[in-house]
Image (cartoon, grey):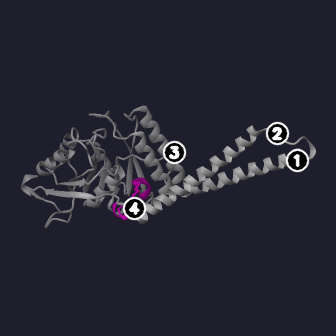
Amino acid sequence: MLQITSSGPLPHETTPALSIVIPVYNGATTIGALVAALAGLDIPGGIEIVLVNDGSPDDSDVVCRRLAATASVPVTYVEHARNYGEHNAVMTGLRHARGEYAITMDDDLQNPPEEVVRLFLHCRDGGYDVVYTSYAEKQHAAWRNLGSRFANRVADLLIDKPKGLYLSSFRCMSRLVIDGVTRYEGPFPYVDGLIMQVTQRIGTLEVRHLPRAQGRSNYTLRRLVRLWLNLAFNFSLLPLRLAVFLGLAMGAIGGIGALYVIAHALFGQPPEGWASTMVVVLLLSAAQFVILGIVGEYLGRTFQTGNRKPQGIVRAVVRATVPDHAR
């Protein structure tokens, strides 16, 4: 086995048909079993596995380096200098993927490895640029399923995707899409939003979804909110347009209220009471702060992008190939 710490191509190496990109976070107890199962698959044209350790606090680094040294298929191990988030890790993995197609999947064994073959063949033989998986029954906690449904409903409004398409992290994409997506260098990637900017030749495939093998989900409410913000503010101007409509609506309500007060003062008793006045003031102030917050979020992201906030800093890359006689 040849092992080097470089991201460049190795001499005389062949291009695999499929790269499997796996972001790893607290996956020390599951990633070994997943890589072993993937290595046993019969993929026409061969596979490689790309592991991206996204600043895991557990022993994922040690386990992934051992896998790169011992796996029976080519493995590329990429270590992030810190935790940047799942989509940032996927972007790094796609940049190191050499295959004509790439499948992204989680490290928790909830996506059965044997479904990889079906997904790859469905994408390749069906002539799709991207194939998303869907699940008859998701084995997540109720709040996580609710969050996923909410994110997909928001995506229906904000990005140009087929209505009702489930945006799963278990997806297959062609080289065209890989190259298009990885052109984005900003600090707030949302992979599915980038995919929709590249192609509309999208397919779906129903696969099984298994209960989590070890531990608990790394997706917290905070991470889900951050994902929603990336979706809302990086790929759509709709929040700004909603702020405009909110301002117009509040202005209209204020105008109607002013006419009422004037008419009441001229033809009736002068209006009294501070309670109603304070309610109106608080309502208008809340609308103003919402609008300022939306504008501030766009400006803040523009500022961080302009200052070249990193999408992900790579600490090390370990590339390993398997000699032909060992395959």
Q: Dot 2 lies on which element?
A: loop
Q: Dot 3 lies on which element?
A: helix
User: In the drawing, does residue 224 fall left or right of residue 255?
Assistant: left
Task: State which tag comes first along the sequence, 2 or 3.
Answer: 3
Task: State which tag comes first along the sequence, 2 or 4.
Answer: 4
**What label does residue 61 carry, if any?**
none
Tell me the residue that label 3 is attached to: 153
Q: Position of residue 306 (x, y in %)?
A: 43, 66
Q: CA distance from mark 1 to mark 4?
A: 55 Å
| Magenta-drawn segment | 178-194
* Amino acid type, callout 3: Arg
User: In the drawing, does residue 200 fall left or right of residue 288?
Assistant: left
Q: Nearer the viewer, residue 272 or 6?
A: 272
Q: Position of residue 212 (x, y in %)?
A: 30, 34
Q: CA distance from mark 2 to mark 1?
A: 14 Å
* Amino acid type, callout 4: Gly
Task: State which tag comes first along the sequence, 4 or 3.
Answer: 3
Tell me the residue that label 1 is attached to: 263
